[in-house]
Amino acid sequence: MTLAYAPSAPVGITALSEVMERLGLRMNFAKDEEIFCQDEEADLTYLVVSGAVRTTRLLSDGRRQVGSFYYPGDLVGLETGDIHRFSAEALSDSLLLVVKRSALKAFAGDEAVDRAIWEATRRELERTQEHLLVLGRKTACEKVASFLMDLAEREGGEQISLPMGRQDMADYLGLTIETVSRMLTQLQGASVVEFDGCRRFRVKRWDALERLAE
């Protein structure tokens, strides 16, 4: 892990990112490197500048649940309590802006910063609600289609990258890795998506993917 002071130029357009850049540090994390661990004191807040981050929780029997995935512009480590309920690791070589929660609290009352934190909190709640729906009410094919649709809508380009592996997808969707691989093969066989290797795909039939995702 490499530490360096953040430069003066803002990396984002929000007031929150500008505040974090003034107060925090830039931290580089290598692929699979731990950012914070489960049950650790939540005294830092992280803004993803580049790369991608996954949050995970280990259950008492050793099983792993992936909580969510975070991309540039997302805040990681927002907690309502004093500890992190999930661990966080870099999915790829990643750059994060890191600032102490106490430093951010000093800006409480700043309308733009408060609005940005509220927006990040709202997005986290929506992300959790969508995840619950996917886990509880969708078939395996619908789960995988929803996951690919979310990535496609987020990136917006013709070629969409998959920073996570099949096991990460399985642990996020509550499926086995064999089921995820089978569903991806099924979607590709039906010409809904087309994969270029394991980590890139494009959507060939948006209407079909949307029907499955919804």
Image: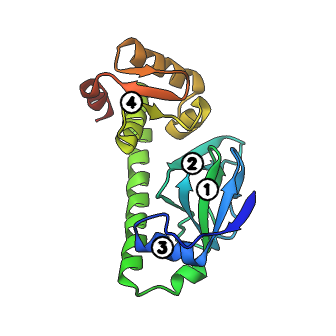
Q: Is residue 186 above or below residue 148?
A: above
Numbered circle sitting on residue 145: 4
| Callout 3: SS | helix
Q: Position of residue 111 (x, y in %)?
A: 35, 82
Residue in front for this viewpoint, 68 or 16: 16
Looking at the image, which is closer to me, 77 or 125?
Answer: 77
Disc 3 target residue: 18
Q: Measuring from the top left, give residue 75's x and y in whole percent.
A: 50, 62
Comes first in the chain, label 2 or label 4: 2
Asked if marks 2 and 3 touch (Cβ < 8 Å), the reply is no
Give me the residue at 59% from left, 37% from top: 168
Circle 1: residue type: Leu
| Vertical position of residue 155 compared to residue 126: above or below | above
Q: Earlier in the sequence, mark 2 or mark 3?
A: 3
Of the residues tagged 4 and 3, which is closer to the observer?
3
Residue bearing mark 2:
51
- Which secondary structure, mark 2? loop
Inspect the image, locate mark 4, and give the three-letter code of the amino acid beneath it: Ala
Cα–Cα gap, marks 3 and 1: 16 Å
Q: Position of residue 109 (x, y in %)?
A: 41, 87
Whichever of labels 4 and 3 marks the residue nearer the N terminus, that label is: 3
